[in-house]
């Protein structure tokens, strides 16, 4: 009798929502039978199942899948206090208050970081929300709090589902940015170590001293040295490692300990800007604005070429040809400066 009465109330709720409702409708070849089959003129079909007898989660999933194979969504209703399959399939627990049935769980709203319970609502309103897609069955990815029990699937408004998806995308983006920043910091550390080793090695070669003195007479380098000294508040000289391929034909400017502080007048090359100048994240100083612009244009063109090649390879058949990775220019890297341009306080 309880099962029959629940079926009648489900059918009445579906009709109140503007749907047609029939009791005890069998599927093709008798593979399934719906307690209440709600349908529309556009051939949308939903089975409203009154499940009061004991059943396992595996069995109720199998019954749900048999209906889904024939294009019928199955939603399950029970007024039992202990429902082991609640949330394993689209389902709701009901309680009776006087003459009315009330939907109590698992309905939730997303509050920005958690899923919190929705207030209980009458069965008729719940069925109306479900049939009009104001409630959808959703698998939550963020934690559930203040709930009687955590479930695999709950009922939520589509806006809450979209809000959770946006939250997950933002967190993934933040984690990816943090990982990229850590990788950039590691590359910067390795690049600085390489520069220090190159400078120590060069200072053991007397011929390098003559090359450094020659580079110290390049046009505009005096102003570059003064600018670097003003930026770092230390004495700056031309490094003995001048001519190292890392500097893209530029001149290293170092302090008395040989620590690389800046690179003067690196030249555009035939390929992309060397990884070192991007990884080390130090100022690049130029004798003229025209030289700085030419270098920047070349670097931008190289980056566009790298992205175009990567996109073309992504469309090729697997496996694609290997493409040497080029790091993105760091967002917070110190931009190249023209000699004479000073940092604002």
Image: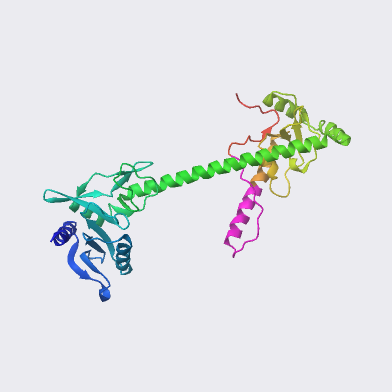
Q: In this rendering, would 288 be left or right of 86?
A: right
Is residue 97 depicted above or below 253 in this figure?
below
Q: Does the magenta stretch include residue 304?
A: yes
Which of the two residues, 335 or 260, is positioned nearer the viewer here? 260
Percent across and percent down for residue 292 are 69, 37
Q: In this rendering, would 262 be left or right of 27?
A: right
Percent across and percent down for residue 123 are 19, 52
Residue at 74%, 42% (x, y): give it: 246
Residue reaching furthest to the bottom: 29
Is residue 211 depicted above or below 180 in this figure?
above
Q: In this rendering, would 291 be left or right of 130?
A: right
Percent across and percent down for residue 176 are 53, 45
Q: Which colour scheme is used?
A: rainbow
**On the rendered image, what quadrant is the C terminus found in?**
top right
Which of the two residues, 130 or 25, is positioned nearer the viewer here? 25
Asked whether residue 293 appears in the rendered view, the answer is: no
Residue reaching furthest to the left: 99
Is residue 17 depicted above or below 257 in this figure?
below
Asked whether residue 245 appears in the rendered view, the answer is: yes
Residue at 57%, 43% (x, y): give it: 180
Q: Is residue 264 magenta?
A: no
Please state the extent of the stretch shown in magenta in the rendering.
301-330
Quarter of image, res 214: top right
Residue at 88%, 34% (x, y): give it: 206
């Amino acid at each position: 009798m309880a099962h029959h009465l629940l079926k009648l109330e489900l059918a009445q709720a579906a009709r109140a929502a503007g749907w047609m409702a029939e009791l005890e409708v069998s599927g093709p070849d008798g593979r399934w039978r719906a307690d209440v089959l709600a349908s529309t003129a556009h051939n949308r079909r939903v089975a409203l199942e009154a499940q009061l007898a004991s059943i396992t989660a595996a069995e109720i999933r199998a019954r749900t899948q048999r209906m889904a194979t024939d294009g019928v969504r199955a939603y399950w209703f029970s007024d039992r206090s202990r429902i082991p399959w609640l949330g394993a399939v689209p389902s709701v627990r009901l309680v009776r208050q006087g003459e009315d049935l009330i939907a109590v769980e698992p309905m939730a709203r997303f509050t920005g970081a958690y899923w919190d319970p929705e207030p209980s609502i009458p069965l008729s309103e719940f069925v109306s929300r479900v049939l009009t897609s104001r409630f959808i069955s959703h698998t939550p990815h963020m934690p559930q709090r203040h709930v009687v029990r955590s479930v695999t699937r709950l009922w939520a408004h589509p806006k809450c589902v979209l809000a959770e998806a946006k939250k997950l995308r933002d967190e993934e983006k933040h984690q990816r940015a943090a990982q990229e920043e850590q990788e950039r910091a590691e590359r910067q550390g390795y690049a600085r170590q390489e520069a220090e080793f190159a400078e120590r090695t060069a200072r053991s070669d007397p011929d390098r001293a003559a090359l450094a003195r020659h580079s110290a007479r390049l046009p505009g380098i005096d102003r570059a040295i003064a600018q670097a000294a003003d930026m770092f508040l230390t004495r700056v000289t031309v490094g003995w490692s001048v001519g190292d391929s890392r500097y893209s034909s530029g001149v290293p400017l170092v302090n008395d300990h040989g620590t690389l502080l800046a690179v003067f007048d690196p030249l555009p090359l035939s390929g992309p800007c060397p990884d070192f100048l991007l990884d080390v994240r130090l100022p690049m100083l130029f004798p003229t604005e025209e030289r700085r612009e030419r270098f920047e244009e070349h670097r931008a063109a190289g980056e566009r070429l790298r992205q175009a090649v990567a996109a073309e390879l992504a469309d090729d058949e697997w496996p694609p040809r290997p493409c040497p990775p080029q790091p993105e220019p760091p967002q917070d890297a110190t931009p190249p400066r023209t000699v004479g341009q000073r940092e604002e306080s």
